[in-house]
Amino acid sequence: MRDHVVAVDIGTGSARAGVFTAGGSLLGKSEYPILMNRPRENHAEHDSEDIWAAVCAAVRSAVAASGVDASVIGAIGFDATCSLVVRNREGGQLTVSTGGESRFDTIVWLDHRALAEADYCTATRHEVLAYSGEFMSPEMEMPKLMWLKENLPESWAQAGYFFDLADFMTWKATGSLARSRSTLVAKWNYLAHREPGWQADFLNVIGLGDLRERGGLPEDSVPVGKSIGTLTAEAAEALGLDRDCHVGAGMIDAYAGALGALAAHAGDLASLEHQLALIAGTSSCVVSFSRERKRSTGMWGPYYEAVFPEMWLAEAGQSATGALLDHIVSMHAAGGAPTAALHDRIVKRIAELRLAEGELLGGRIHVLPDFHGNRSPLADPHALGVISGMTLDASFDGLCRLYWRTSVGIALGIRHILERMRDYGYVPDTLHVAGGHVKNSVLMELYSDVTGCKVVIPKMNETVLLGTAIAASVSCGLHENLGAAGAAMYPGGHERLPDTAKKALYDRDYRRFLAMYRHRAELDGMD
């Protein structure tokens, strides 16, 4: 009986795979690194064949660790970052790199080379922008495609296929050119609630009138939980699975995480509207669902059926959170390589310093965490980070104070997002946190105390893999729908309520946080 599924999560630096039962138990998992090329500032590139090789190795290893046979695996699902894969008409690799190496055929999600193109899209004020927060981010696919056409015309002329990374994986696995609704509505300005979904006038305005023909992009999209097809003989051999294994429609990684984090509420749409998923790692994504379309200026969306049928998804986020703490650790004189061990040492010392100095630890240090732009709610990719209140202290304790206050700044950024969401009619009261930040006790405390929200921490911190597994289980008929799969596979979670005694302290920090935004704008506006 095919009562197991494989989930694959492709992140910024690695590919991970896990084998799940129909009840949500994770039997085995594995992880392999993937290469990244950083040829110049704001440029980041992957080799898609390197990614596929890492995925195949991870799947084989995870299946071996699980102890199950390929014959019991009903489906494999993929989630991935929003990275753009470019292939020629024969399916071969085409360079996206100014260095010219053909193997670097993928522009990574965090690549900001297309800032000017994103600004151009925003300036059009086209109606499609109402479904991307009234602005265009350089992390989306259209600006990256515009940059490619203008700066690498030979690659554009030879192009035959453009893929979001998750769709590239389903193509490699099945040979199908079908695209996921999750990727198209979220990253390609595709309007799934309309027919046609592609808005030809917008493509013409931004100079991409030939995009669909050049990129092999179909008119229709495949919803989450549907099968793209079964594995080809070549893919089955590479993955160590068999040809009767279904391949589910791909997902954006953060949305897979949202599905996994909110799985217990997937069958109750009224309850789902009060839950937020905070997927927090290198960057942070806040994902919310609603039955009615709501305003989302300064956020991404609202996206129709990016995960759940007949539900709108809005995504806010911070472009650098875990990456920002890594940066603080590596740039400080008392820091170094930002290893997990060093982060743990800092977190333990912060606890000691708070006991000795009280809640005002580092209280004159204030941090705006926009070191890689402000994704939400200001929607300003040009925004810069700010640190106020520094002295000549280069000691380890000085680093700990700065780390603590940077963490406070990150949590204040989440509060800023939630306040704007409430202004738009969203009703969040519970944060379901998943990702690497779950391991950081400083951040987990602050997410609750600073925002005033109940925080739920899943018992199994593999929420992204779980969400992908849930969707895969529906694609092969193991569960009837996402709600049924969520109820069967969700592992439960631990709750943390905010410490109301600290409300006044963080209210004051929040007022100072907003004042710093005003002061930064004043400085930027001076002649």
Image (spheres, grey):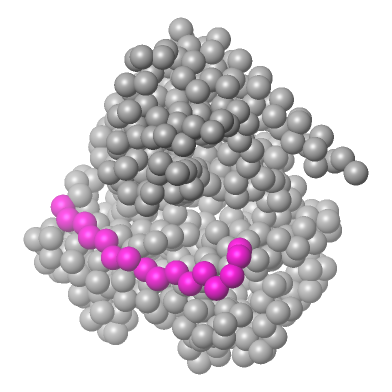
The answer to whether 183 is drawn above or below residue 239 in the figure is above
Decide which of 427, 195 is in the foreground and name it.
427
Compared with residue 212, is residue 303 higher up or lower down, i.e. above or below? above
State the image coordinates of residue 8 (x, y, percent, origin top left).
33, 61
Residue at image coords 17%, 56%: 28
> Observer-nearest residue: 462 or 262?
462
Residue 95 position, x and y percent, is: 55, 83
The answer to whether 10 is drawn above or below residue 375 in the figure is: below
**Which residue occupies 46% across, 36% down?**
394
Where, quadrant-wise, is the N terminus in this rendering? bottom left
Can see residue 481? no
Does the magenta run of residues contain 32?
yes
398 or 319, nearer to the observer: 398
For image coordinates 37% across by 26% down, the residue present is 350
Q: Give the quarter of the image for residue 208.
A: bottom right
> In the rendered image, is residue 512 in sight?
yes
Q: Position of residue 308 (x, y in %)?
A: 48, 46
Please report the bounds of the magenta region as a residue range.
27-42
Is 107 displayed left or right of 302 in the figure? left
Asked whether residue 330 is drawn in magenta, I would say no
- How many numbered discs sit on the rendered protein? 0
| Image-quadrant location for residue 302 | top right
Q: Position of residue 53 (x, y in %)?
A: 32, 76
Quadrant of the frame with the C terminus: top right
Which residue appears at 24% of the width and 67% of the height? Answer: 59
Residue 66 placement, left or right of 410: left
